[in-house]
Image: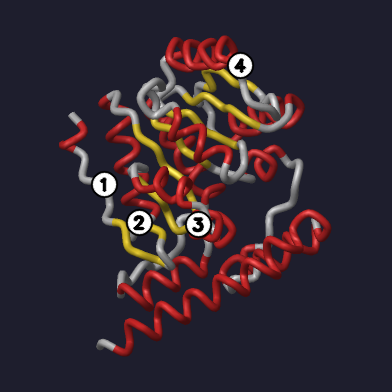
Amino acid sequence: MTSDIHWPRKYNLIGVGVSGTTYSESLALVLQAARSGVPACVTHLAVHGLMVANRDHGMRAMLEVFQIVAPDGMPLKVGLNLIHRTRLPDRVYGPEFMQMTCATSAAEGIGVYLYGSHPHVLAALRQRLVGRHPGLRVVGSQPSAFRPLSREEDDQLVAEVNGSGAGFLLLGLGCPLQERFAYEHRTRIRAVQICVGAAFDFHAGNKRMAPRWMQQHSLEWLFRLSQEPRRLWRRYLVLNTVFLYEFLLQWSKLRRYD
């Protein structure tokens, strides 16, 4: 059954495989999988996630088996276009992709399960999603325990997700916890698992999303840094600099052989 779905090609970006894909292609593929009952793992990587995978062989190996590793950040989209000439028109932003998935799920009657974040965030998120997408079936939700689950708790969660009949399991655990969860449950959970990072907080109204113009000009990192400087300063100021160095190194090596 999985051979009928042609997942997008991945390209090497500073040692990590990133899918050269678009919103429309990714949405069509995950819908095909959900309709057919084919499990799949999907994530959306920004620079932070890419750098985690670049430095962590275990994380990188996990992402290799993901069906889609979408370029969430504008720097990844630009990097794919410059190095591999993918001609991508836009990034595939996790929060936006989550809304598109919910809209189509509502239209087609596909159940959605939410896992991650805090109870009050999930309650607000569920209310807002159903309000924005009339007919959306949120067939279950569970907040993060913010610790490793016991075997009994894990078995109970898997049984609940599978028993709900969800076509999509949306994961808001944060990177790299959500990617590790999806990987470890890829043969146990029958839904399409989609890692969406901070989307739960954004769509629940718990955190502000960067203005559209800042997103389009690769300045989302600056907006988020201004909102949470103590938590995010190292992620953006250090990792972004290291990413730029690694990217320029890869680009210069390729240009040498052009």
Q: Which residue is mark 3?
A: 72
Residue located 76% across and 41% down the image: 206
Residue 19's disc is: 2
Q: Looking at the image, tell me whether mark 1 or mark 2 is earlier in sequence order.
A: 1
**Within 10 Å of the Cα at label 3, are there few (<14), some (14-19), or many (20+) other Cα atoms?**
many
Callout 3: helix, strand or loop? Answer: loop
Judge by depth and name the residue closer to the eye, 180 or 32: 180
- Image coordinates for residue 47, horizontal then vertical, percent: 55, 62
Residue located 45% across and 80% down the image: 249
Asked whether the residues under the numbered discs 1 and 2 touch, taking CB atoms below 8 Å apart as contact, a structural biologist would say: yes
Rendered view: 181 above or below 237: above
Give the amino acid at mark 2: Ser
Give the amino acid at mark 4: Ser
Q: Which residue is mark 4?
A: 150
Judge by depth and name the residue closer to the eye, 186 or 108: 186
Asked whether the residues under the numbered discs 2 and 3 touch, taking CB atoms below 8 Å apart as contact, a structural biologist would say: no
Callout 4: helix, strand or loop? Answer: loop
Residue located 48% across and 28% down the image: 169
Number of the front mark, 4 or 2: 4
Number of the front mark, 3 or 4: 4
Q: Which residue is mark 1?
A: 7
Give the amino acid at mark 3: Asp
Residue located 74% across and 51% down the image: 208
- Image coordinates for residue 180, horizontal then vertical, percent: 51, 37
Give the amino acid at mark 1: Trp
243 displayed left or right of 118: left
